[in-house]
Amino acid sequence: MADFPDLMYETYKKLFKGYRYPLAFVDLDRFDENIAYVAATQKKTGKTIRVASKSIRCLDLIKRIFEKGGDAYCGILAFTMEEAGFLLDNGFDDIIVAYPSIQPGDIELFVEKIKQGAALGLVADCIDQLTALSRAGEKAGVVLKVCLDIDMSYRPLGRAAHIGVRRSPVHSLEQAISLAKAAQNLPGVRINSVMGYEAQIASVNDDYPGQSIKNAVLRFVKNRSVKELTHRRGKIVAALKSAGLDLDIVNGGGSGSLISTGMDKSVTEVTAGSAFFAPGLFRYFNDVKFKPAAFFGLQVTRLPDKGIITCQGGGYVASGEVNTGRLPWPVMPSGLTYLSMEGAGEVQTPLLLPETAPEMSLCDPVFFQHAKAGELCERFNRLYLVQNQTVIKSVLTYRGDGYAFL
């Protein structure tokens, strides 16, 4: 692959000579390039960028995004209330928890942090969630801020076709207005923001090498979806404001839709997360290009046959739809492929060597990308940081800090 020339493999191999494998690392030169690139996508739009912490899961690297990105970045999109509490305790603020939960422990933590003065919100998409939050807020004598989650999926044939993810049941303007008006009659809770994640644009590759017809079809569907959701979101936001809602934030998009979401006049901010690590499933977008920055390495422990090496560990399969794209991506040396009968295993991963591969010996490393971004950190306690072809230090992941939030 052009992204990973042989010299890159030799550089990382030399850097980590004598280190214990498996290990994970982030190339800060590439990470910082992604921070600057994401910021540049909004230079003309004036939109700020909210950081999706789910895709990072490392306090030091989240801090680095804000330090390097400056005023372009504002706020965090967390994935659980417990994670939000952890981030608040470590100096972050302006957090929206992007996935609803009304279990007692989460509501108690929400109330506790609001009492402490945190800028914290929680998404909701139904009256039952709003009612539970209302009771808690009223009982505690506080107002809990809620972000109304709008379904941004594409339904070209009505309910007969759903292109996107299954998140909020609130899809139409009428559904959004009905829920917003119901919330206005609930004490202890206030809808102050709106969000909508267009997964069918933000997380679907449309620039696969050598697949021009597939790419054309995907881009056609994406363009139609962008037009539909931009129109619908604009109408919903305008109607909510007319209904008396004071909206501080209208959040939209993800790493793969930074361009189209940023152009939406109804949106006040966009979200980015996977862009910073640029994992395997975020490699082939037409509108945006990120530099792969996060990797893990395994050691070769067996040479079972000519043209085959076996690595220790490696079964770090990504969540989501079950397909080979969810396996780790062996990227260095280039051209490595899985054995179809084995794939990536818990304790060992055999790989086929291409004819162009360098000679491989026991203890040599193989470097992979995780298919997704933050899930890499659920497998490692620390990330080594590489800068200017030098390992400068290691930092703890959430796991290394002793936390697993989901």
Image: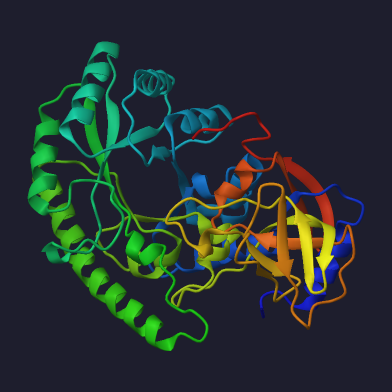
Front residue of 374 and 236 = 374
Front residue of 259 and 296 = 296
Front residue of 3 and 119 = 3
Against 144, residue 302 (above or below) is below
Q: Name the side, left or right, on which 38 lies relative to 26.
A: left
Horizontal and vertical percent position of residue 182? 10, 33
Against 98, residue 281 (above or below) is below
The residue under the point 58% across, 43% down is: 57
The residue under the point 38% across, 87% down is: 213
Against 29, residue 58 (above or below) is above
**For residue 266, what is the image quadrant?**
bottom left
Q: Name the side, left or right, on which 126 lies relative to 101.
A: left
Horizontal and vertical percent position of residue 327? 57, 59
Total numbered badges shown on the rendered structure: 0
* The residue positioned farthest toward the right in the image shown: 18
Q: Quadrant of the N terminus?
A: bottom right
Horizontal and vertical percent position of residue 80? 43, 34
Q: Does residue 66 show up?
A: no
Q: Name the side, left or right, on which 296 lies relative to 166.
A: right
Front residue of 70 and 261 = 261
* The residue positioned farthest toward the top in the image shown: 139
The residue under the point 41% across, 58% down is: 254
Colour setup of the view: rainbow
Horizontal and vertical percent position of residue 355? 78, 83
**For residue 121, what is the image quadrant?**
top left
Q: Does residue 328 show up?
A: yes
